[in-house]
Structure formats: structure tokens, C-alpha cells
């Protein structure tokens, strides 16, 4: 059940004290004997809060030195491009990181005019730099993505422009915690003034926007007579949309160009917290309320790696939009080779599989995490990679790589292209897909689990499951390694003809997540969810 505050503008009394937050960043010191205060690189880097001693200057100094060591050991000598979003802790973290990187002799580039840089723009920049430079470049994105205003985040994007592999982040994580344990002995720094004067001031945005016509049919958009609204949700890409209007003359109506570290303009999410999640109907209440004003509207989270599409019918479910985007792209990109595959995570909707079969395209299913799509996008065997959490990217029109990280900007502009070309918005197209392939009922829920039970769940094998049926249907497949790349999923997935569930332990809470889908009914979905809990409990109790 949603909190009473859900969908309502955040109360002034609930806003974060930014001064206190930043003060805690510099003054508080983590105790890494406490697991919650250690450096931990999850699927999207290290995240935490300075109030909780999980994201403080000590963490960033240690991570930055560990990353400097990694670059030196791997002979990475090109520019380290540094992006940050609009969270309050992002600028202090940028300063801390620069002090270390410059002290280690690393060539750094930061946004000109102390600006902000979206995650996909950083990825694009690294890819472009490595086309011409003999010395390979990489990047850092300082963002906790859609997390609440008090959180901070730090992510490493490798020389391919995408999220670094687990083996790389594990190395950085281990070394960073060693530096913290040794009271930062061996961490090199320069003063703040020297750090910023030594860093190149770089225009990230203009080259990215100028190149958009290589991935989106911008001429079609220029000729379309659509009324389109944009809400950047106070994020890092406000200037991107302004530059799009400047270069292409689209006349996008930017309904909110405000940067406010407290995000006081946000509607609360389902739990009453402020969370800039552009896939949440609660957080997106303000833009949804304007749906009748526009033919199409869209939003992004603070680092712009996620997309939120609003049509006359309201906010699109991310799974629904991914299905439409895939259906459209693989039939409207003549420069793409016929053998390209569709990258999807194992917890994304099976509507994608049904669409893929109808257009004779193979699905490449992976564990959760966009990093699993990087190799495919870079080396040209994936045309598209997408996650159920509203994150995706795809190739340029000529079949070459664009961004090897999630790009919420091009997914939003693709909705514009689809609507302009087909004279139907993505929600109307999805209804047609439902008429053809059946209606999908999808939901994610949580169930309690101890740390011991979560550890068991993470290491299951298909042989541990004795059940032969699920919600009245024969089980056709059980797997604990993803079908596409055979990597461990850290849980299991159980499949029938008209439904499936996947169970994965949470990395931060005493729960496990159940993703489930039915192509029969809501009642059938509920049965799948209930039986999923029974099946999982029988093997982890």
C-alpha cells in the first residue's frame, strides 16, 4: 500500500538539510568494521549517505587512489573524463576525487562552467575520444542515480565507455577499503585550487547533441508538428535539452529547468520518500498531470540514464516501452545487420521474447546489470540492450556503438520519432502488441530472508528445485545461469508456457526480490507469486 504522502509534493519540513549533509561528508569518518560503512561497488558503483557514514570524503579519497592505482597497473594513460549529477554530495565528491587524480598525474577533464554531465554523455565522450587517441581514456560518473537527495554515488566507466566489469570494481573496492583501514596512508592529494586549475574544462554536451542525428531521425522530428513536454526532474541533462532546442529547433517545452539540491519540487514516491525515479507514477505525478497538454512528454532521473514516457494514457510501464522500442527499431534501422540480437535482463518482460519471435530476432538474456550488454553493443552483436528498470541504449543508425551505458535521452527522443513516423504514440502501439501477443501482468514484490537464506538463494542450482508445476502449468525451464551469456544470476528463474518468476536476494536489506509475470490474468500472477515464495522457502529454509 502506498504511503499517504505518495504522489504529493514533498513537505518543506521533510527536505534535507544540505549544509548539514555536506558538513557530515567532510567531518564524519567511516568505521569499516561496520559492513554498511565500507566501500561496496554494487551494480551501479558505490552509493551511500554522509549522515550514515557510508559516503564521506574518506570513501572518495580511498576509491580515487584505488582507481589511480588500477589505471597505472593497466597502463591507462588517456584522459579521465569526470561527470557529476545534481545531487548535493556530487560536487564535494568531484572535488575530493580531483585532488587525488591530479596528485597521481592523471589528465582529467570536467564540465566547463562547473556544469553537470549525464551518464550517457560521459559514455559517448569516452567512446569518441578512444576513436582517435593513441592513449585510452575512461571515465567516472559521480551519481547515485535516482536515489534520494541525501545520497551520493561514484561509478567507474571503463575504456569501453560502459560500467566496469565486476572483476575491475572488486579490485578497486578491495584496495579502497585497505586504504581506509590504513587511515588513508598512501593516498596522494593536492589542494583544491591546484586540482581545479589542473583539470581541463570540457564541453561534453555540444558534441553529443550534434551527433544525435546519427542515432535518432532528427530531421523527422524537426518536421513533426507535435507538442512535446520535457521534465528533467532537476537533473544533469537540463542543458542537453536546451542545446537540442538550440541546434535542431525542436521547441521542446522544458516544464522545469530548476536545479535544487533538495529537489523540493518533487512528488514523493510510493513510500513517501523523495526519489527521482522517472518510472514511478508517484514521483512523476506532476508531469502526468500535464498529459492532456502534450502529445507526448518525457522525463529523466538525475544522471539521465533512465527514461520516463508520458502519453495521453499516462506514464508508460518501462517493460511496455522497451517492447515497443525493440519492435520499432529492429524494423526501422536499415543500417543494422540482420544478425543483431536483443539484449534483455532475465527479469524483463517476456513480451520482449514474443515480439522478438515475431520479427525473427534472437534474444540475448543476461543477469541484472547493464554491464552485461557492453560487449555486445561495442562489438556489434547486440542492436539494443535494456533493463526493466527503465534503462536502455541502442546502436547508431549505421550499426556502430553510441553509448555503452544506459541513455535515457535517446530513449525519450525515440518515443518522439516513433510518434512522428507512425502517427501513433508508444502506448497505442503497445496496445496493438497486446492484441497480438496477449496481455502481460507483471509485478515485483519482496519477501523476508535472513543473510544465511540470501546466501543460499544466491548459490542455488536447478537441481535444487523439485517442483514440476507452477500455478497449474508445467515448468518448462529452471535456470540459475542466464541463457544469453551463461553468467550466474545470483538466484533462480522458473518458467512455464504462460508465466515465470525470478528470485534474487537484496544486497542491502533482509529480503529477496520476486519478479513475476503472467500472460493469463492478475489472479494467475498472484498464484505464481505465492508459489514462488513456497518454492524458494523450501530450498533456503
Image (cartoon, rainbow, N blue to C red):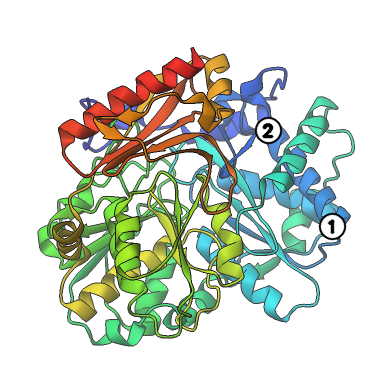
Q: What element carries label 2?
A: loop
Q: Name the residue under label 2.
A: 39
Among the 4 quarters of the image, the one containing residue 89:
top right
Relative to 433, 17 lies left or right: right
The N terminus appears in which quarter of the rendering? top left
Mark toward the viewer: 2 or 1: 1
Total number of numbered discs in the rendering: 2
Q: Residue furthest top?
A: 541
Cα separation between marks 2 and 1: 22 Å
Residue 205 relative to residue 438: left or right:
right
Q: Which of 61 and 402 is in front in this view?
A: 402
Which residue lies at the image location 74% right of the left edge and 66% below the top edge? 79
Residue 319 in percent (x, y) is at 31, 52
The answer to whether residue 20 shows anywhere in this view is no
Q: Is mark 1 on a helix, strand or loop?
A: loop
| Relative side of 181 to 531, left or right | right
Depth check, front residue: 248 or 158: 158
Residue 227, horizontal then vertical, whole percent: 18, 72
Residue furthest to the left in view is 292
Q: Which numbered tag is attached to residue 74?
A: 1
Position of 242 relative to 110 (above/below): below
Q: Residue at x 78, y 68 (%)?
A: 78
Residue 332 seen in the figure: yes
Precedes in sequence: disc 2 or disc 1? 2
Give residue 343's position: percent from left, percent from top.
Answer: 47, 59
Amino acid at each position: 500500500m502506498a504511503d499517504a504522502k505518495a504522489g504529493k509534493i514533498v513537505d518543506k519540513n521533510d527536505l534535507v538539510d544540505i549544509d548539514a549533509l555536506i558538513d557530515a561528508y567532510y567531518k564524519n569518518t567511516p568505521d569499516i568494521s561496520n559492513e554498511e560503512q565500507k566501500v561496496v561497488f554494487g551494480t551501479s558503483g558505490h552509493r551511500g549517505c554522509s549522515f550514515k557514514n557510508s559516503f564521506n570524503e574518506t570513501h572518495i579519497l580511498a576509491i580515487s587512489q584505488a582507481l589511480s592505482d588500477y589505471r597505472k597497473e593497466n597502463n591507462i594513460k588517456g584522459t579521465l573524463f569526470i561527470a557529476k549529477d545534481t545531487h548535493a554530495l556530487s560536487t564535494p565528491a568531484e572535488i575530493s576525487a580531483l585532488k587525488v587524480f591530479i596528485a597521481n598525474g592523471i589528465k582529467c577533464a570536467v564540465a566547463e562552467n562547473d556544469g553537470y554531465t549525464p551518464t550517457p554523455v560521459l559514455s559517448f565522450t569516452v567512446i569518441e575520444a578512444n576513436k582517435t587517441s593513441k592513449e585510452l581514456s575512461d571515465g567516472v560518473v559521480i551519481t547515485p542515480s535516482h536515489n534520494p537527495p541525501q545520497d551520493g554515488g561514484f561509478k567507474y566507466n571503463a575504456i569501453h565507455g560502459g560500467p566496469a566489469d565486476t572483476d575491475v570494481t572488486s579490485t578497486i573496492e578491495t584496495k579502497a577499503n585497505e586504504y581506509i583501514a590504513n587511515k588513508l596512508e598512501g593516498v596522494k592529494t593536492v589542494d583544491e585550487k591546484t586540482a581545479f586549475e589542473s583539470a581541463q574544462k570540457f564541453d561534453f554536451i555540444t558534441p553529443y547533441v550534434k551527433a544525435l542525428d546519427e542515432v535518432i531521425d532528427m530531421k523527422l522530428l524537426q518536421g513533426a508538428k507535435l507538442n512535446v513536454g520535457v521534465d528533467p526532474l532537476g537533473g544533469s541533462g537540463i542543458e542537453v535539452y536546451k542545446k537540442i532546442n538550440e541546434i535542431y529547433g525542436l521547441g521542446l517545452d522544458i516544464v522545469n529547468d530548476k536545479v535544487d539540491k533538495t529537489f523540493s519540487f518533487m512528488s514523493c514516491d510510493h513510500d513517501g520518500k523523495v526519489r527521482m525515479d522517472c518510472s514511478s507514477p508517484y514521483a512523476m505525478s506532476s508531469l502526468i498531470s500535464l498529459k492532456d497538454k502534450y502529445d507526448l512528454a518525457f522525463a529523466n532521473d538525475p544522471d539521465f540514464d533512465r527514461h520516463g514516457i508520458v502519453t495521453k494514457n499516462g506514464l508508460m510501464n518501462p517493460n511496455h516501452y522497451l517492447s515497443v522500442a525493440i519492435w520499432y527499431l529492429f524494423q526501422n534501422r536499415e543500417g543494422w545487420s540482420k544478425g543483431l540480437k536483443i539484449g534483455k535482463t532475465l527479469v524483463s518482460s517476456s513480451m520482449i521474447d514474443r515480439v522478438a519471435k515475431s520479427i525473427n530476432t534472437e534474444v540475448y538474456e543476461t543477469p541484472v546489470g547493464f554491464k552485461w550488454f557492453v560487449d555486445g553493443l561495442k562489438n556489434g552483436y547486440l542492436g539494443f540492450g535494456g533493463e526493466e528498470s527503465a534503462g536502455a541504449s541502442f546502436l547508431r543508425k549505421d550499426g556502430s556503438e553510441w553509448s555503452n551505458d544506459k541513455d535515457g535521452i535517446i530513449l525519450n527522443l525515440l518515443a518522439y520519432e516513433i510518434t512522428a513516423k507512425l502517427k501513433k504514440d508508444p502506448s497505442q502501439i503497445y496496445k496493438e502488441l497486446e492484441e497480438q501477443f496477449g496481455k502481460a501482468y507483471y509485478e515485483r514484490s519482496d519477501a523476508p530472508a535472513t543473510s544465511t537464506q540470501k546466501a543460499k538463494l544466491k548459490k542455488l542450482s536447478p537441481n535444487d528445485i523439485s517442483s514440476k508445476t507452477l500455478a497449474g502449468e508445467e515448468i518448462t525451464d529452471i535456470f540459475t545461469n542466464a541463457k544469453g551469456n551463461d553468467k550466474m544470476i545470483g538466484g533462480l528463474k522458473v518458467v512455464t508456457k504462460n508465466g515465470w518468476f525470478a528470485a534474487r536476494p537484496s544486497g542491502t536489506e533482509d529480503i529477496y526480490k520476486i519478479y513475476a509475470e503472467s500472460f493469463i490474468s492478475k489472479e494467475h500472477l498472484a498464484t505464481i507469486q505465492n508459489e514462488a515464495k513456497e518454492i524458494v522457502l523450501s530450498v533456503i529454509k
